Image (spheres, rainbow, N blue to C red):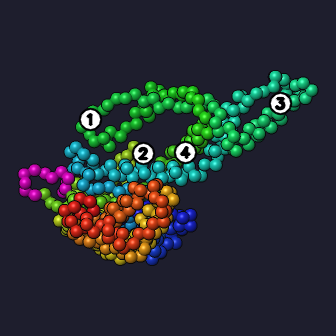
Amino acid sequence: MAIYLPQSVEEEQLALDELTPREIVAELDKYVVGQHEAKRAVAIALRNRMRRQKLPPEMAEEVMPKNIIMIGPTGVGKTEIARRLAKLANSPFLKVEASKFTEVGYVGRDVESMIRDLIEIAIEMIREEKLEDVADKAELNAEERLLDLLLPAMPTAPAASEGSTVGFGTQPMLLGSESSGRTREKLRQQLREGKLDDRMVEIETREKNMPAFEIISNQGVEEMDVNIKDMLPNIFGQRTKKRKMKVSEAFEYLIQEEEQRLIDMDQVTRTALERVEQSGIIFLDEIDKIAGRESGHGGPDVSREGVQRDILPIVEGTTVNTRYGMVRTDHILFIAAGAFHVSKPSDLIPELQGRFPIRVELKSLTVEDFIKILTVPKSSLVKQYIALLDTEGVKLEFTPDSLEEIASFAAKVNEGTENIGARRLHTIMERVLDEISFSAPDLKEKEVKIDREYVGKMLTDIVKDQDLSRYIL
C-alpha cells in the first residue's frame, strides 16, 4: 500500500530520541491503515536503536538489531511501514527483492550489491542535507560571479584614473570604485527583480569527456566498481567549454557549481558510511521466493538456498568492501517480508531463521480498511482525484455511500481473483472515473457527484463477468 505523503516541518523536526514506541506507532498511523502488530514490532526495533546509542561503547557493540519478518499478502502495507519508519528515523533506506539475487559465481546480482546501493543512497541523502546548509552562501557566490560577467558587458565611460571625472556634454560623471560600486548594486537589484533574466551571457562550463570503452571480466559489474578517472587523472582531465545562455539559466548553473565547491565530499562520505553502519535499514522483499531447501532434481538452485547462504553473513554481520571504504553490517536493521502462500518461514535455512527473531503477521484488508485508505490519509486517493479534476474546473464530490460501494467492490474482486490489497483501489477508482476523466475538458456541468448508483453503473457488469474482471480489475 504505497501512499506517499509530504511531511510537515513540525513532523520533520520531531526529536527522534524523544519518541516513545506509542508515538512512533501514532506517526505510522498517519500513513498506513491498520496492521497494529507490525507497527508495534518496528516501533520497538527503532526504540531499541535509540536505547543502544545511550549505552557504553563496549556494551553497545554487543547489542545486535532485532531483525523482523513480516508475513502477509501484497498491498497490505509491509513496504510502506518500513519506508515510513526509515523516514521517521532519518535513516538510509533500501528496498530490494530477494528473488533478484543469484548465488556467488553465477550471472546476476550478488547480495553484497545491496550494501553498495545503500551507501550510494546515504551519500545522496547527506549531500542533500549539506546542500540545504550551503544554499544561501552558494546563491550569493553565484550572484557575485554573474555580476562579474555582466559588468564588462555594460556600457562604460572612457578610461580615467580612479576618482577623476570625465565630462559627457555638461554633466560630469564620477569614475572609479564609487561609480562602479553603484553600478554593481544597481545591476544586483535588477538581477534580483528578474529584469536581466533574458539577457545572454557567456560562461565556461565543464565537459565530462570520458572515453567509451568496455571491460570484460568474469566478475559481476559491482565487483568492477573502479573509478577510472581517479586512477588516470592526467589522461582524462576535465575540459571547459564556453557556452552562451540566458542569465536565468546561467544563474542556476553557477549555483550548482558553487554548491559543489562548498560541499566537502570526503566528509559527506565519512558521515554516510557511519550512518549506514549505525542506522541503515534494508527491506528484503519477496523473501518467501528464496525459501526452500535444495531438492534432489540433480542441480543446484542458484536463486534459493545458495542465496540464503550468501545473505546470511550480511545479516549476521560482516565487512563489505565498497568504492568508498569498508562497511560493517553488524548494526544494519533488516526487515524481511513475504506472502508465504506456498512456503513458510520455517522453510528458510535454520541459520537465517535465527537472525530474524521477530515475526509479525499482517492481516488482509477489510471493507472498513479500504474506506479509511480512500479518505483518511492527507493525500488519499479521493483527495488526489478531486485535486486532479479541479485543474479542469470540475468540482468532484463523493458521497459516503459511493465510497462504501467502491470499498465493497475492491474487497469482492480481491476475494474472487488475486488478492492485491489496497492496490486494487487504484484500478477500481480509474474504472469509476474513466468517463469523467475523459470528458472533463468538455463538460458543461462542472459539478459532478459520485454516488452509489453511479459506481454500480460503472462496475456491476465487469464484476459480474468473472473472466472480464480478471483482466480489467
Q: Which residue is mark 4?
A: 264
**Disc on the earlier residue, 3 or 4:** 3
Q: As shown in the figure, which amino acid type bears the numbered disc 4?
A: Asp
Q: Nearer the viewer, mark 3 or mark 2?
A: 3
Q: Is residue 304 above or below residue 232?
A: below
Q: Which secondary structure lies at badge 1?
A: loop
User: How far is the residue under mark 2 from the one under mark 4?
Assistant: 14 Å
* Residue position for label 1: 217
- From the image, state whether disc 3 or disc 4 is nearer to you: 3
Please indicate, yes or no, whether residue 140 appears anywhere in the rendered image. yes
Instruction: Kindly report the distance in space between the C-alpha atoms of the residues bearing marks 1 and 2.
Output: 21 Å
Q: Are marks 1 and 2 in contact (CB under 8 Å)?
A: no
Residue 442 picture quarter: bottom left
Q: Which residue is mark 2?
A: 324
Could you tell me which quadrant the C terminus lies in?
A: bottom left
Q: Are marks 3 and 1 in contact (CB under 8 Å)?
A: no
The crowding category of the residue bearing disc 3, from other C-alpha atoms within 10 Å (few below 14, some 14 to 19, many at least 20), is some
The residue most toward the right is: 170
Q: Name the residue at 87% across, 25% down.
A: 168
